[in-house]
DNA sequence: CTGCGACTCGTACAGCGTTCGAGGTTTCTG
DNA sequence: CAGAAACCTCGAACGCTGTACGAGTCGCAG
């Protein structure tokens, strides 16, 4: 937004600052780490919209504008807290197979997002290049390279896996947040959503039939099963790509998807 | 947030309103459809943060608070615009295979999010039960049921596929938004991000090696290839699940993932 | 004409992120 | 020890936000 700083992200500024010889002070009363910790507490307790600089300052016994000494802007604070929670993810040193490693990673990341629901909303805004995120990337790169994926395939595999995890967590979080905001229990919420869908069932032949056969649905339980189902799909798909590598998937040559199912781009005349 | 209304979403209120006999006026000067259209124009042109009720009102030649006659709250407007853009997605009547249908769906949804980058950020906030979203669900349900998926498997397949699309689109959008916000070209942005990563390469053995071998990376081109790679993984994984259905994946019985790769939940002593 | 429902909107409120600059405090330098 | 320099805090203010409220306007039924 503002062009007054040449640097684009916190991490660049920090690298520059650490490069110059920096005089160290003992107790500045406030610290970046302290601010980040308090911000995460506030975010976990009251959600993304409840975090304001004034409230955060008050929580730290400081004025709102004092925070701006440690943090350039609120967005920068978001970068910091996001990378901080990424640090919570345990990256295992030894696993029995790459599938096992990926599964642990997937469940860990999913639960990280369920623990910090606000984090998923920050993902859509800025790409993450903080130290913890980079460490995560390096670890996953090792997993897939050691499994036998080529360089490009490994990078693609990482994107595929994390995209699935993030997408799945996003819908779960959206559901939980909606329930929390409504002040109802999940069951009440469901009871209120159903007739709303049923009112439109005239246009929805498949869902009508689905609801006729399965009148009881409890998504609460099935969310984890559902996550596992999709995770296995992704891993099986990756395994298939590993077994029969095909052409090395560099950036040269064939465009996407012409070989198998069509690109999805061409027009079909009917309907 | 506020408990003054019993209804939880726009769609419920609208159903109730349509139920009661409603006197119709010809030209109220403003209309919900008009507001939604203008909001989408503004969102596409200037992004999510640029949409304020005052600006939207001004764009329509009306006062800001006039909008509140047609829309209960700003969040409700978000529900409306999100479902409106879902209506842009073409749902094909005939396809050569379920993979082809799913591929078309995936590319269509991806490009919808690239066309309306703000939409992906709205997804994380409220679950979508608008008419267009429901129509989408019904269509995908038909695709997977006709492909031979059982009822629960079809629902899981839908979640898996859309989670992948949403997750992938989210990272793409985050990248594009960051580039746009920085005011730089993608190349400049990349040039500035690189040394920032390189500064940390000491802790990142795999990425160091990766960069040593592939010093040139142009993510601009590879984004679509990458999307296609992961999409094929997902589809192959689904196909595998279709070929060998295993136990009907209802909600009863086995917990997630115990059979294949471990749950990712258990602790490993080492490291 | 009266009355009523549909609709518009000016005003106001509390809160937001952020800038500015005046102050205080600590540490370094001469 | 004096003074400069760096570090840190923060009150005041600006322009913005979503939206509650109530007064006001319009078109039409009786």
Image (spheres, coloured by chain):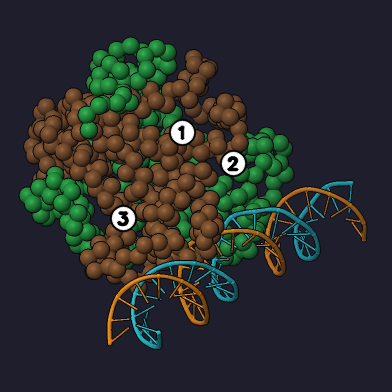
Chain colours: A brown, B green, C orange, D cyan
Q: Which residue is mark 2?
A: B10
Q: Quadrant of the C terminus of chain A?
A: top left
The spot of residue B89 in percent (x, y) is: 39, 41
For mark 3, give the secondary structure: helix
Q: Is residue C10 above or below residue A191?
A: below
Q: Chain of mark 2?
A: B
Is label 2 or label 3 in front? 3
> Residue at 27% of width from left, 68% of height from top?
A22
Q: CA distance from mark 1 to mark 3?
A: 29 Å
For mark 1, give the secondary structure: helix
Is label 1 or label 2 in front? 2
Residue B135's disc number: 1
- Residue in front for this viewpoint, A211 or C20: C20
Q: Chain of mark 1?
A: B
The spot of residue A197 in percent (x, y) is: 55, 29
On the rendered structure, is A251 left or right of D4? left
**Nearer the N terminus, badge 1 or badge 3?**
1
Q: Is residue A48 in view?
A: yes
């Amino acid at each position: 937004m503002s062009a007054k700083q040449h640097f684009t992200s916190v991490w660049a500024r920090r690298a520059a600052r650490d490069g110059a010889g920096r005089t160290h002070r003992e107790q500045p009363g406030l610290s970046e780490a302290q601010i980040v910790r308090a911000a995460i507490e506030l975010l976990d307790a009251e959600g993304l919209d409840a975090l304001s600089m004034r409230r955060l300052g008050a929580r730290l016994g400081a004025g709102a504008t004092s925070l701006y000494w440690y943090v350039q802007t609120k967005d920068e604070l978001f970068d910091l807290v996001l990378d901080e929670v990424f640090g919570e993810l345990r990256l295992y040193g030894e696993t029995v197979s790459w599938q096992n490693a990926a599964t642990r990673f997937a469940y860990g990341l999913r639960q990280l997002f369920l623990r910090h629901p606000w984090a998923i909303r920050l993902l859509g805004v800025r790409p993450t290049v903080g130290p913890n995120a980079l460490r995560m990337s390096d670890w996953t790169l090792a997993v897939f390279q050691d499994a036998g994926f080529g360089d490009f395939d490994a990078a693609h595999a990482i994107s595929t896996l994390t995209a699935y995890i993030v997408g799945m967590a996003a819908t779960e979080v959206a559901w939980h947040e909606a329930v929390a905001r409504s002040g109802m229990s999940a069951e009440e919420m469901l009871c209120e959503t159903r007739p709303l869908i049923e009112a439109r069932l005239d246009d929805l032949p498949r869902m009508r039939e689905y609801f006729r056969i399965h009148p009881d649905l409890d998504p609460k339980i099935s969310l984890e099963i559902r996550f596992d189902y999709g995770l296995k799909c992704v891993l099986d798909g990756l395994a298939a790509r590993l077994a029969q590598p095909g052409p090395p998937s560099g950036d040269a040559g064939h465009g996407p998807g012409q070989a198998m199912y069509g690109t999805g781009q061409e027009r079909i005349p009917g309907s």
